[in-house]
Image (tube, rainbow, N blue to C red):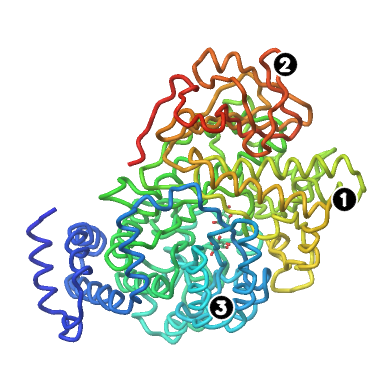
Amino acid sequence: MYEQVSHALLNDILDELSNEICRQDLRHFFTRLGANFYAIHSLFFHLYGHREDFKAQMVHLTERLARAYIDRPDVLKQIDMAREEDHNWFLGQQWVGMALYSDGFAGNLQGLKERLPYLQELGINMVHVMPILQCPRGASDGGYAISDFRNIDPRAGTVDDIRALADSMRRRDMLLTLDVVVNHTSNEHEWARRAQEGDHDYQNFYYCFPNRDVPDMFEATMPEIFPETAPGNFTWDESMGKWVMTVFNHYQWDLNYANPAVFIEMVDIILFWANQGADIVRLDAVAFLWKKIGTSCQNEREAHLILQLMKDCCQVVAPGVLFIAEAIVAPSEIIKYFGEDAVIAKECEIAYNATFMALLWDAVATKNAKLLNQGIKSLPNKLDRATWLNYLRCHDDIGLGFDDADIRACDYDPYSHRRFLVDWYTGAFAGSPARGRPFGVNLKTGDARIAGALASLAGLEAALEDNDEQAISEVVDLILMLHAMIMSFGGIPLIWYGDEIGTLNDNSFLEDSHKASDARWIHRPRIDWSRAERRHLNGTVERRIFEGIKRMISVRKDTPAFADFNNRELVDVENPHLFVFLRTHPSLAANSVLVVANFDTKPQYLDLETLNRRGLFRYGQITCLASGDSPAIFNNRVVVPPYHFYWLSNQRPGALFEDSFGAIPRRSLS
Ligand code: GLC
Ligand code: GLC
């Protein structure tokens, strides 16, 4: 794309770059800058073009990008080039992730490096290390209140430790994911301190107001994120004598992206961590990046433009680095964080599939897949070169962000259905074995979310206490079936640390005054390595879960139909307890896989005859890839035991080119 205005500006900027920058070998940088400059300029102009210093800011940005490129280690530049050649590399089925707190998992970053073999034993090759940047000693929202974006918190280690970890992971073909908290800083960050000292330039990094006039306007339409512990969206700062916007906790100050200096700093920080060896950067709370009076201040168009601009800048310096969007918002909004177009308006390559996560928990509580089917049916197809992070649990709560229209389509009332789910998972509903806690209860709106460890929500804690072997066994099946869903849905499965050995709730947070009021700590465990050792003992819960997940991971890696090229077809079956979808192999229809899951506590059956008639799945000798067994079939009906799943294939070993599935659309890999 050649556009005169932006190109003329680029010429000027190149003239202004310092000699020191120009002496470097910047060939690849300049090709990428040329290719992206029209987009960078238009976006930057859209956001900041009204300012007198627009051109100076543009020069400043370009200079920062050039410096970041100069600092990028050669080994990472080579990886960038390899990934440019193989640009769909992250859509393959071989990637399986785990998210973990380095302290809870292994003490610190060095400990984590020593534990990499454990992760490899399970088959993990992507690790999201939860926030490790410097943050205040007391409450810091689990590391999401950052006081220094360029230093590792001494409790976790040093920048050298992260480089050593990245090196070690690279040698093991593992990907490193790090957080950059783009939406806010801690009130102890230097920018906030300078603002508190009265520096107007830094007050401009945040949203500061002398009185309640503007805050009251904002509050009229802004929801509360932590209504119990941090009601409202503004905090009075005594030293500044101003109200400052704090959407999350009162000590997390929202950054003002209407100020280009904030944008430039943040891009520089993203590139700094990319240069320390992060393969993937998780951008926290991206839905909140733009604030506008009269709106919910989430999912604003400018938030998307900022992300597009961040992506374009990152593509110039470190094109091999991917972004994860953490946008836990309505299903129709989440999908927009991939961008408007895979090439010219790209945002994040990866996004949390919060919709699928919450729908799976709905199916567990209701023992049927009605809403799950409905919700997935409403989920639009993604862009090309975009993929989901499919997860069951993470460090956060479970929000019941389904689409109300989908809930109604299943003949439930949205309010009472959500109420039922909260009651179910907090154990308030008679007969529920779940042991979660309510989180984010808002008495004004009636909203509530759920905290709790996967195993405890699924009923393992209750079954173990009752010493009920049959219940234990059922819950283990359920836990494995849920993992089978995130392994086969399409996207990168992300396991929450501890879930691979059935870790239960940890109530010790109640004794720590900085954590007690935030129930999410109940599911941020400290791994008990003696329990983890029990994965080697026959018959233990730890072994059944660990080995079950390990086997699924290894089968997933060998199953090309599980790569993510939007090659999934939801299959409507008459049985509401079953969730069924077909993963079509991109080029070999015969290698497609039919995924079947029974959310009921009773056996159910799947009618193969109807599938066959619709040309969906031609059966012959069918086997489950996960177990290697053939399921019981009677009168063309496959029996699906309670909490059981199948990955059905009718491919005979060696029959690679036989198209036995009938008319399945073939999609190309490009
Ligand atoms: C994200 C994080 C969450 C944190 C919030 C504020 O949603 O996942 O843990 O509380 O951002 O940083
Ligand atoms: C916000 C919170 C996070 C929560 C999400 C959905 O992003 O930070 O904790 O999971 O909203 O409720």
Q: Mark 1 and mark 3 in contact (Cβ < 8 Å)?
A: no
**Quick one: quadrant of the C terminus?**
top left
x, y percentage for residue 156?
60, 79
Judged from the image, the secondary structure of the residue bearing numbered disc 2 is: strand
| Residue drawn at x 60%, y 13% as measured from the top left | 609
Q: What's the residue at 62%, 54% (across, down)?
A: 495
Q: Residue furthest front?
A: 654
Q: Classify 10 Å Cα crowding around label 3: few (below 14), some (14-19), many (20 and above).
A: many
Query: Which is nearer the N-term, disc 2 or disc 3?
Result: 3
The answer to whether residue 570 is above or below residue 58 is: above
Residue at the (53%, 60%) spot, across then down: 126
Q: Which residue is mark 2?
A: 634
Of labels 2 and 3, the one closer to you: 2
* Dot 2 or dot 1, earlier in sequence: 1
User: How many other residues sit within 10 Å of disc 1, few (<14), some (14-19) or many (≥20)?
Assistant: few
Locate residue 590, reporting x and y percent: 48, 28
Q: CA distance from mark 2 to mark 1?
A: 35 Å
Badge 3 or badge 1: first in the primary sequence: 3
**Tag in front: 2 or 1:** 2
In front: label 3 or label 1: 1
Label 2 close to label 1 by CB (< 8 Å): no
Asked if residue 614 is positioned above or below residue 365 in the image, the reply reads above
Please, what is the three-letter code of the amino acid marked with disc 3? Cys
Q: Secondary structure at mark 1?
A: helix
- Name the amino acid type tagged 1: Leu
Q: Are marks 2 and 3 in contact (CB under 8 Å)?
A: no
Q: How many marks?
A: 3
Q: Nearer the viewer, residue 501 or 560?
A: 560
Residue 464 numbered tag: 1
The image quadrant where one finds ligand 1 is: bottom right
Name the residue carrying label 3: 135
Spatial CA distance of label 2 from label 3 is 60 Å
